[in-house]
Amino acid sequence: MSIKNLQPRFFVLLLFIIVAGVLRITAAGHITPYSNFSPVGAMALFGGAYFADKWKSYVFPLLCIFLSDVIMNLTIYDAYVTGIMYDGWIWTYFGFAAMVLSGQLLIKKVRITNIVVASVVSAVAFWLLSDFGTWLSPVNIDMTTGTQFTKDFTGLVKCYIQGASTIKNTLLSNLVYSAIFFGLFELMQSKIPALSISK
C-alpha cells in the first residue's frame, strides 16, 4: 500500500479504539478514581457506527479488548486467572460483539437519540450474554448461598438477577464515553475534511 492510499480516517478511528483500551486498563488497575467505569461499550458502539467495512467494526474493537485482557490477566489479575484468559470469556466477547452490532444497526446517523438507544440496547445485550456465560461457568457462585448456580432455569434467573446491578455502570459508562468519543470525532470531522472522505 502506498502512502497515497493511507486513509487518515481509519487511523484516527483506530486511535480512538486504542485510547479506549488504555483507559480500560487504568480503570481495572484502580489507577483512576473511576474504577470499573469502562469505555469498552462506547468503543464497540463507536466502531460499529463509523467503520464502513463491517469486519473492521468487529476485529479492531475485539482485538483491543483481547490485548487489554491479556495485559490485565498477566499483571493486575494474575493471582486470580490461570493462563491468559478467564472462565467464560467467550460469552463476554459475544457480548462485546453484540455491542458492535448495536452500533451498526442503531447508529446509522450520529444523533443523540440513536446513541442513547444503542447504549441501552447494548448494555442489556451485554448483560444477557455475559451473565449466561457466568451461569455456564463451572466456577459460578450464587452470592446468596455460597454455592454454584443450579443448571436449570431457576439458576439462570438467579444469575441474571445478581448480575443486573452491573447494568447501571455499563449504561452510564456507555453514555458518558459515547458522548466523548462521538462528540469529539464529529467535531474533528467538521474541522478536518479528510476524516469524512473514507472509513
Image (tube, rainbow, N blue to C red):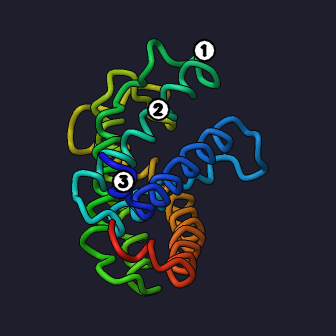
Residue at horizontal 42%, vertical 23%?
A: 85
Closer to the camera in the image, 5 or 66: 5
Query: Eyeballing the image, is 118 above or below 55?
Result: below
Give the structural element (helix, strand or loop) at label 2.
Answer: helix
The percent position of residue 98, horizontal first and vertical second, equals 28, 56
| Residue 126: mark in rendering | 3
The percent position of residue 186, horizontal first and vertical second, equals 51, 79
Q: Amino acid at mark 3?
A: Phe
Which numbered disc flags the more N-terminal residue, 1 or 3?
A: 1
Q: Residues within 10 Å of mark 3 (few under 14, many from 20)?
A: many
Give the structural element (helix, strand or loop) at label 3.
Answer: helix
Does the residue at mark 1 contact the one at mark 3 (Cβ under 8 Å)? no
Residue at horizontal 38%, vertical 60%?
A: 7
Q: Amino acid at mark 1?
A: Ala
Question: Gap in Å between the C-alphas at discs 2 and 1?
Answer: 18 Å
| Residue 79: mark in rendering | 1
Closer to the camera in the image, 192 or 41: 192
Q: Is residue 172 rendered to the left or right of residue 140? A: right
